[in-house]
Amino acid sequence: MLEDKNNEKTSLEKLGEFGLIDHLTKYFTINHKSTIKGVGDDAAVLDFKNKKTVLSTDLLIEGIHFDLSYMPLKHLGYKAVMVNISDVYAMNAKATQITVSIAVSNRFPLEAIEELYAGIALACKTYNVDMIGGDTTSSNKGMLISVTALGEAEEKDITYRSGAKPNDLLVVTGDLGGAYMGLQVLEREKEVFKVNPNNQPDLEPYSYIVERQLKPEARKDMVELLRKLDVKPTSMIDISDGLSSEILHLCKNSKVGCHLYENKIPLDPTVINSCEEFKMDSTTVALSGGEDYELLFTIDQADFPKIKGNPNLTVIGHMTDAEGGANLVTRADTLIPLTAQGWNSFQGS
Amino acid sequence: MLEDKNNEKTSLEKLGEFGLIDHLTKYFTINHKSTIKGVGDDAAVLDFKNKKTVLSTDLLIEGIHFDLSYMPLKHLGYKAVMVNISDVYAMNAKATQITVSIAVSNRFPLEAIEELYAGIALACKTYNVDMIGGDTTSSNKGMLISVTALGEAEEKDITYRSGAKPNDLLVVTGDLGGAYMGLQVLEREKEVFKVNPNNQPDLEPYSYIVERQLKPEARKDMVELLRKLDVKPTSMIDISDGLSSEILHLCKNSKVGCHLYENKIPLDPTVINSCEEFKMDSTTVALSGGEDYELLFTIDQADFPKIKGNPNLTVIGHMTDAEGGANLVTRADTLIPLTAQGWNSFQGS
């Protein structure tokens, strides 16, 4: 559907809700045995047999969570799925189904919605997730997307936020701060564009961090890697609001403290360079930036040999007794209490 | 929380997202064994064992689906749950869990959100449904609610839209058109209020239809009644968009036609009286009004003696071969093809 060079726009009003649903759902296929009935009845019907069902949901709202002036609709659709299935992977589960509800104002023609669904369909295909339902409606302002993701897991494999013990190692996948610095670059280019619409931005030096912002990938591969390495995390969470906020969640739910080592936080060179350019502190960016969708987890020290040397997994600290609190151990070897400065949509940041 | 007479308003900005979630979720309890983990981790964890999982989702948007000038927030919360669990009952399943996501602009103080959640909590309690998660965020305009409802059923009990056969009887629960006429009354009073804000409307004569609009009840009782009567519908759907639209869904999915008898459509006297007052045709209102949240289903003729004479169940027609199409048999005994004139949010009706 992305090949359509026809410039005529189709109004949603003409198509109606059922027409739109019929039109959009034909791009999706059902692949999981657990999906008995997807789109097309009052409700979807699923069968997880002896496995547990895992379920998470998120709202994404134009002007709050995304800016269509630099977020292509296809990327937005893809990211909306990632944000949700990332929560399923954070339970150490396999993502299997999603529902997608959208509300759009009349300013969006059918072709725009098709772009959005092309991204959703790509995410479903890449991550092997069935689209099983949703709702489409008009809004009186802008666009919003509500995604619910389902997954399945054996009871023994599920990781909660609450299982960390003192002396467990704190591990993070990938690197941090990229999505936030990508956002800084995009926001700057938006301002430049406002002043000079003919200016062609050169985003090439920033391609890694811009992609981290616009097309994040959920860490399905890391859940599979951990299984292959025979490591079951004692606790796990995904990094949506920033490392600091997520560590505090693990500490609170597991009733433990933490030592996080500043010099261990994995940063891509592009993040370090852009932090210098924007005069920002890279540790602060990693701690509070958010939207990295990496996995943060704790493991028993006995499992350390299994993950040692793996380039995707970085030990960034260890858990302590609750009394010690959650602390950053700085490069100067001083302890600073971690505070949640993650993103809060109720403060017009 | 409804007893709070303190008039000071608390801003959501001050509370933040996690504070708001903590504050709101403490009013909910978990009652189902299938809920292993509700709010408080990356995802909820459920265990439906050998039963099938049923799932449905809906978006409700201020200015499109509800008008806060006459819809109290507590009623809105209650209705948002009803709209969704109604879809679960339409599968002949038991509603067990919901997730609720909301986006609200800064114009809503905490106390308003508490009212909304009081309605959600009342619905959860009345219908024995666990609140297991959701998302809260700010919006740049108005309020929106996204609810996902889950249920469970034995495979043999599930009713799809696709099982109706020619000669099956078409049955509806309760009566129709009330919610739509209630909306007409409320819209009229809103106009009167605009002209004269001191006017005190007397809604007493309209209490039944106003309640049908503001506080609909999903027909859990009818699913239970059918089980007690040992009747398994061959197909079922809930009436959200109007009788006509839902009959066409059953016909299309079951590949059958239908004779719907105009003189059999159950109408409450208040609906008939208000239709006369508003100079509207009561059949049209029942066919296209929507929001009644009654159940429409088909049964094998052999099951007729089981439902005969039950005041909650009305046989309104029978299914035919697909060739005959879906038709209304008027009081004058003429056939008129049914058309879907249900509500379409993309047309600014």
Image (tube, coloured by chain):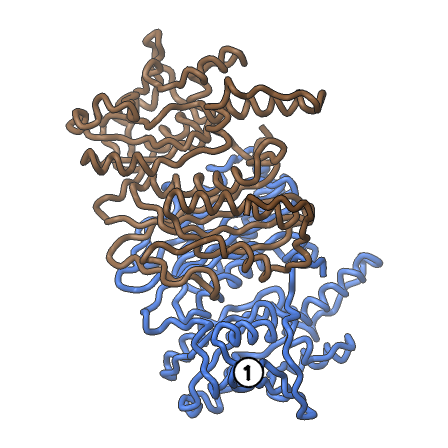
Chain colours: A brown, B blue
Q: Position of residue B187 (x, y in %)?
A: 74, 63
Q: Is residue A321 left or right of residue A63?
A: left
Q: Where is residue B29 in the image (x, y as percent from the top left)?
A: 39, 54
- Which chain is indicated by disc 1? B
For the point 30% across and 34% down, the residue is A222
Q: How would you rate the neighbour count of disc 1 (Cα within 10 Å): few for under 14, some for 14-19, many for 20 or more? A: few
Residue B322 to residue B149: above or below: below
Q: In which quarter of the image is residue A303?
A: top left
Give the labeled residue for mark 1.
Answer: B323
Mark 1 residue element: helix
Q: Quadrant of the C terminus of chain A?
A: top right
Q: Where is residue B50 in the image (x, y as percent from the top left)?
A: 26, 63
Q: In this view, does B284 lie to the left or right of A321?
A: right
Q: Which amino acid does label 1 sit on?
A: Glu
Q: In which quarter of the image is residue B149?
A: bottom left
Q: In this view, does B151 lie to the left or right of B275?
A: left
For the point 45% across and 87% down, the residue is B307
- Observer able to see residue A69: yes
- Observer able to see residue B3: no
Q: Where is residue B224 in the image (x, y as percent from the top left)?
A: 40, 75
Say which of B140 and B246 sits in front: B246
